[in-house]
Amino acid sequence: MDVDCQFGQQNGVEVDFKSDVSHSAVPPHTSLCLLRVLQEALNNAVKHSGVRKFDVQLKETPHEIHLTVRDSGLGFNFETARASKGLGLNHMKERLKLVKGSLSIDSQPKRGTAIRARVPLSLETDPKHEDGRQLA
């Protein structure tokens, strides 16, 4: 994912990106999903964290891909953010559901935020949502 360099340059921030993932093992629809989640998480972090440095880690386990976007910024109250629906959290969760993934958020005011996405490497079904929409 080359989004870290482009994103950092476009937004005047530093993105420390680390990956141990074999890109050939990641299906294209999963890769696209993780890219969109990463973009949303970084956009939210730039807007709301109050910091200019972000850590991104992409890890592969035998059965899953894990994406973590972390900052040491202002943080937020998760319940308040979920109720306001203004941070794109629901959008990330819905996108991950399409690839049978999940999202977890660890954030507290003045203690930073960690957004974690987990996606299985192999899907048992076609890469379509139950209603037939393609992931593109």
Image: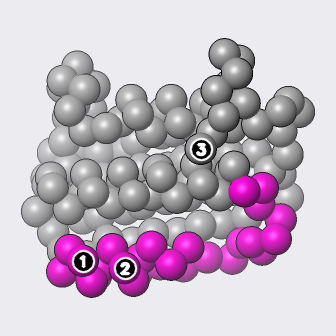
* Quarter location, residue 133: top right
Tag of residue 10? 1
Q: Amino acid at mark 1?
A: Gln
Q: Residue shown at 72%/56% (left/top)?
A: 28
Give the percent coordinates (x, y) of residue 34. Answer: 56, 54
Q: Is residue 132 above or below residue 59?
A: above
Q: Identify the secondary structure beneath mark 1.
A: helix
Q: Look at the numbered discs 3 and 2 and tell me whether their residues touch, using CB distance below 8 Å.
A: no
The residue wearing badge 2 is 6
Amino acid identity at mark 3: Ala
- Distance in Å between CA atoms under marks 3 and 2: 21 Å
Sequence order check, earlier mark of 3 and 2: 2
Label 3: few (<14), some (14–19) or many (≥20) C-alpha neighbours in 10 Å: few
135 left or right, relative to 60 = left
Specify the amino acid type for callout 2.
Answer: Gln
State which region is magenta: 1-28
Q: Is 34 drawn above or below residue 98 in the view shown?
A: below
Which residue is under mark 3?
136
